[in-house]
């Protein structure tokens, strides 16, 4: 509750901050506290989390806080007694962990007997900040300058750097952008290279990608125009998910269930309307060149289009000008979700240069798809 009240209610850094502690007898257990925050407040969030850990070690919790914590543990315990598996696990733990036969019979009495002094004593014993490890995931170039200024107990944090595979790397560096390169020039270059601006009769573009997902055939059909876009994901020949953006609004459909998207999301999705999204993003006038970053071992220009409901971040190869990654950050009723798509092996079909392969995350699994069809002005 303290982390939540501090980082969300007071500071507005996150939509939620929580902590937990394990109880393994086989391995060293650990206490952890975490939060998902914006890049610009990462360093401040680290400081506040550490301060809360220190505070529970030095200050007595209030009577109100203790009462609420006890009520939570009591409620969880009482509800667990409705599950026969949980009751069986209690008996197993008594038999294997050398617990008193009346351990769970007296469990609630033990919870209610805990004092503020007990909380402080245990926190001082187990929550040793000097043994803590601060783990920050995200874009290093965006958070490092401020993180390197953070001091704990008068000492700067020693920082190590790792790639997404856990391999040690050098400190990420921002790369300089050459004079004359702008968000507009990067987007216009990509549009020209795809060839869409050379086809005066191009009104609608349909792409069909195919691959496998969990040993089943997956097909993704994408249809783009200046006024609408539609994506249909089918697995095993059956439509699984459909998303539509049109002049009337935006919705997602899964099976018979359709959910209209909030206007704040729709307003940002409209920015990407076009036979390719870059046409809409360029026309929005909101695209910003953030710099150069290394993405998938390739130096790329980073183009951002901010939004309230949806924010876009696209990456274009510095060498070829082609888009190699697309990232959208969706704010849906306070829940943040990032969707990443990678593009490789561009090939020419129907006089258009399109990504021959794309990959994205679906259900926690990376899906790789191959471009099978490019249809210009398909019949409805």
Image (cartoon, helix red, strand yellow):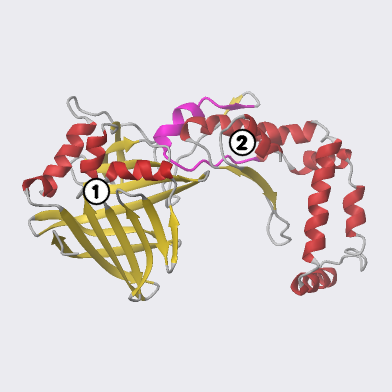
Q: Earlier in the sequence, mark 1 or mark 2?
A: 2
Residue 227 tag number:
1
Provide the residue designation for mark 2.
Answer: 8
Instruction: Determine whether label 1 and label 2 are within 8 Å by CB.
Output: no
Residue 159 x/y as whole percent: 50, 35
Residue 17 tag number:
none
SS at circle 1: loop
* Label 1 crowd (10 A; few <14 / some 14-19 / many >=20): some
Question: 196 or 113, which lies in front?
Answer: 196
- Identity of the residue furthest to the front in this view: 248
Q: Looking at the figure, which quarter contains the N terminus?
A: top right
Quarter of the image for residue 151 reads: top right
Work out whether residue 320 can be spotted.
no
The span from disc 1 to disc 2 (Cα, nearest Å) is: 38 Å
- Report the span colored magenta: 132-152
Left/right placement of residue 132 relative to residue 161 reads right
Q: Does the magenta stretch include residue 150?
A: yes
Q: In this view, does 132 lie above or below 216?
A: above
Quarter of the image for residue 98 reads: bottom right
Question: 220 or 20, which lies in front?
Answer: 220
Q: Is residue 372 above or below residue 290?
A: below
SS at circle 2: helix
* Label 2 crowd (10 A; few <14 / some 14-19 / many >=20): some
Residue 329 x/y as whole percent: 41, 44
Left/right placement of residue 322 relative to residue 242 reads left
Q: Looking at the figure, which quarter contains the C terminus?
A: bottom left
| Labels 1, 2: front one | 1
Question: 256 or 370, which lies in front?
Answer: 256
Work out whether residue 326 can be spotted.
yes
Q: Could you tell me which residue is drawn at 67 percent across and 36 percent down?
A: 5
Residue 214 x/y as whole percent: 40, 73
């Amino acid at each position: 509750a303290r982390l939540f009240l501090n980082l969300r209610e007071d500071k507005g850094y996150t939509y939620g901050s929580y902590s937990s502690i394990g109880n393994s007898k086989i391995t060293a257990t650990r206490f952890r506290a975490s939060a998902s925050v914006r890049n610009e407040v990462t360093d401040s969030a680290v400081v506040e989390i550490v301060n809360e850990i220190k505070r529970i070690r030095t200050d007595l919790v209030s009577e109100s806080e203790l009462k609420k914590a006890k009520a939570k543990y009591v409620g969880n315990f009482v509800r667990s007694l409705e599950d026969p598996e949980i009751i069986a696990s209690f008996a197993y733990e008594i038999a294997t962990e050398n617990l008193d036969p009346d351990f769970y019979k007296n469990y609630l009495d033990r919870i209610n007997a805990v004092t503020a002094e007990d909380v402080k004593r245990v926190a001082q014993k187990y929550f040793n900040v000097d043994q803590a490890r601060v783990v920050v995931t995200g874009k290093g170039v965006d958070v490092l300058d401020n993180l390197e200024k953070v001091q704990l107990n008068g000492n700067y944090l020693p920082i190590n750097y790792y790639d997404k595979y856990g391999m040690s790397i050098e400190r990420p560096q921002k790369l300089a952008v050459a004079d004359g390169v702008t968000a507009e020039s990067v987007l216009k270059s990509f549009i020209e290279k795809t060839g869409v601006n050379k086809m005066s009769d191009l009104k609608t573009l349909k792409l069909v990608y195919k691959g496998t997902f969990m040993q089943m055939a997956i097909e993704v059909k994408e249809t783009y125009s200046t006024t609408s876009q539609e994506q249909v994901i089918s697995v095993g020949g059956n439509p699984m998910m459909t998303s539509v953006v049109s002049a009337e609004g935006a919705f997602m459909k899964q099976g018979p269930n359709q959910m209209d998207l909030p206007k704040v999301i729709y307003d940002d999705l409209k920015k990407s309307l076009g036979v390719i999204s870059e046409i809409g993003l360029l026309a929005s006038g909101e695209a910003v060149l953030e710099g150069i970053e290394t993405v998938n071992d390739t130096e790329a220009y980073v183009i951002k289009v901010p939004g309230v409901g949806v924010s876009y971040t696209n990456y274009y190869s510095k060498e070829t000008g082609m888009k190699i990654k697309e990232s959208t950050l969706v704010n849906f009723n306070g829940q943040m979700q990032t969707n990443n798509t990678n593009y490789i092996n561009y090939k020419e079909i129907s006089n258009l240069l399109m990504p021959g392969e794309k990959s994205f995350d679906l259900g926690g699994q990376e899906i790789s798809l191959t471009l099978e069809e490019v249809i210009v002005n398909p019949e409805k």
